């Protein structure tokens, strides 16, 4: 589906931020109707309404330790974790969550360490899509933000639906001007392209580029 198909229906219903998130979820679940969009908005606002009723209860944001094969990224870096904590949010992390990304636990300030963030976090930030088993551990009404790969993970999408979980697929956020700050694809594509050239150069049985010395040119 085109960006226009995802974006236009939500354009006149709410603030820019709300529109962008709704468009992402519309793309995720492949829905179109006014009724379904309203249901998404209601789900997204559930946690906020709870906090308004009880201002002393901070929102809980958690990032699990990534366990996928060869995955070295982490969904929450120390700088962002600190900023979230400063807003009054309760930030949870699993021990060693940032280790593979070269962020030792000591760099994270004002966070709480737990064995698992899934059963307690209101908002779960993740890199790789959660498994069906992990989705089953989420608390009712939780929100998951990360890469979802929904078209390739039908079982996971069904589990999210059945558990009543609101999921934001970051790879489906529309590539439009007002959503540039939420673009999660450009940085990863740039890194992949850069690394691909380095890997290719290391495998090439020649110098890249050729070297010219006083003794001649080495190719």
Image: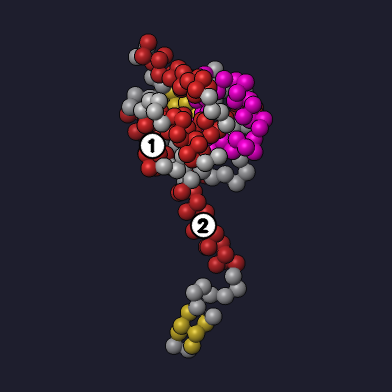
Location of mark 2 (residue): 193
In this rendering, the answer to whether 27 lies above or below 219 is above
Location of mark 1 (residue): 80
Which residue is the extreme one toward the left?
A: 86
Residue 21 locus on image (x, y percent)? 45, 31
Q: Residues within 10 Å of mark 2 (few under 14, many from 20)?
A: few
- Residue under the image location 60 percent in, 35 percent down: 150
Residues rendered magenta in the picture: 141-170
- Asked whether 67 or 51 is in front, the reply is 51
- Asked whether 112 or 11 is in front, the reply is 11
Q: Is residue 154 left or right of residue 110?
A: right
- Residue under the image location 32 percent in, 29 percent down: 86
- Residue under the image location 54 percent in, 80 percent down: 219
Mark whose residue sits in front, 1 or 2: 2
Is residue 29 highlighted in magenta? no
Residue 16 locus on image (x, y percent)? 37, 31
């Amino acid at each position: 589906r085109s960006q226009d198909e995802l974006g236009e229906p939500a354009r006149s219903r709410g603030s820019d931020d709300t529109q962008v998130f709704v468009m992402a979820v519309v793309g995720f679940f492949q829905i179109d109707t006014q009724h379904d969009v309203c249901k998404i908005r209601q789900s997204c606002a559930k946690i906020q309404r709870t906090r308004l009723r009880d201002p002393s209860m901070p929102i809980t944001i958690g990032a699990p330790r990534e366990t996928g094969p060869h995955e070295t990224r982490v969904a929450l870096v120390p700088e962002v974790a600190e900023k979230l904590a400063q807003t009054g949010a309760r930030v949870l992390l699993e021990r060693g969550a940032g280790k593979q990304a070269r962020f030792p636990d000591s760099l994270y300030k004002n966070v709480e360490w737990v064995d698992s963030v899934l059963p307690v976090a209101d908002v779960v930030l993740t890199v790789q899509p959660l498994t069906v088993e992990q989705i089953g551990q989420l608390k009712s009404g939780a929100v998951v933000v990360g890469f979802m790969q929904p078209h390739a993970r039908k079982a996971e999408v069904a589990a999210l639906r059945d558990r009543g979980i609101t999921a934001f697929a970051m790879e489906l956020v529309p590539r439009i001007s007002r959503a540039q700050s939420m673009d999660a694809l450009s940085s990863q594509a740039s890194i992949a392209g850069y690394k691909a050239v380095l890997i290719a150069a290391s495998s090439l049985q020649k110098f890249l580029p050729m070297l010219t010395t006083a003794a001649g040119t080495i190719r």
